[in-house]
Image: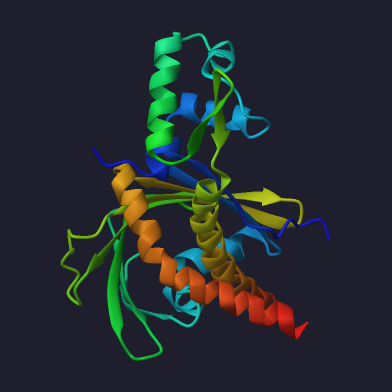
Amino acid sequence: MTIQQQTVITKDLVNRKLFVVREFDAPLEQVWKAWTDSTLLDQWWAPKPWKANTTSMDFREGGLWLYYMEGPDGSRHYCRADYNSVTPHKSFIAEDAFCDENGNINHDFPRMLWKVMFSKSGDGTKVDIEIKFATVEDLEKIIEMGFQEGFTAAHGNLDELLAK
Amino acid sequence: MRRDVFQGIADPTRRAILSLIVLQAMTPNALAEHFDCSRQAISKHIKILAECQLVKQEYSGREIYCHLNSKKMKEVDKWLEQFRALWENKFDQLDTVLKNLKNKKP
């Protein structure tokens, strides 16, 4: 198998950017679909033990994805992604935000700009993600917020390792 | 003024200084030789790095040496590691979604 299924993350703090690269063992059309079809997004977008649930999805330039993350205790966090640009089967740019159930943006939280690029890589597909933050403080805040989720995810992975 | 690890590494010259002292402790003069900017500019960067607790300055005889405070550097690695764990978790789930898509097709 030539697919490099390792997540490569690099940072460019000067330009407030994080880069995530990962290859997938599937044709580009399917990987694109998994990133842009809400039924499929719901199945993977939230890190365990959270679950993503789509309220509405309008995947096109100027469109919006409204969804909530549901925790094991039933708590809900609403999020939205605004699609600023869509080039089918190549890339899309989305701006995400926390919001209420009607999509009204909560400005207390930093927003991130996502550029997701898809390219063929052998029999698989490479996904290049560029995440840009408005300020260094935003970047720190997101990381702080990610701490708890990250711990849970790390423990999940550890459990899998121990089970092997 | 607020100082933290992130501010310390947010500047390319300071990152270059850190990558030099990773290998061995160095004096400010020795460090300055690696850069095109003035000795004063390097001193200022060292001062910021010390305030961020990324660099420890210790006297050895008459000379002052800059040491990397690796404990503090690990904080950055820690959050990046958590960020990575978060994404690996999501991507593993995406692998499963893609596998299911593939199996559905004849």
The one nearer the camera, A30 or B45, is: B45
Q: How is the image coloured?
A: rainbow
Residue situated furthest front in the rendering: B61
Residue A128 seen in the current view? no
Tell me where residue A57 sits by quadrant.
bottom left
**Residue B41: x, y in percent?**
40, 15
The quadrant of the picture occupied by the C terminus of chain A is bottom right
Q: Reply above or below: A96 against B93.
A: above
Residue A146 seen in the current view? yes
Q: Reply above or below: B71 against B60.
A: below
Residue situated furthest bottom in the rendering: A73
**Residue A116: x, y in percent?**
48, 51
Name which residue lies at 49% across and 64% down: A35
**Number of marks drawn:** 0
The quadrant of the picture occupied by the N terminus of chain A is bottom right
Q: Reply above or below: A158 against A82.
A: below
**Residue B90: x, y in percent?**
54, 70
Q: Is residue A12 left or right of residue A69?
A: right
Tell me where residue A104 sits by quadrant.
bottom left
Name which residue lies at 69% across and 75% down: B102
Residue situated furthest right in the rendering: A1
**Residue A158: x, y in percent?**
65, 76
The one nearer the camera, B59 or A80, is: B59
Name which residue lies at 43% across and 39% down: A13
The one nearer the camera, A31 or B54, is: B54
Q: Reply above or below: B90 against A92.
A: below
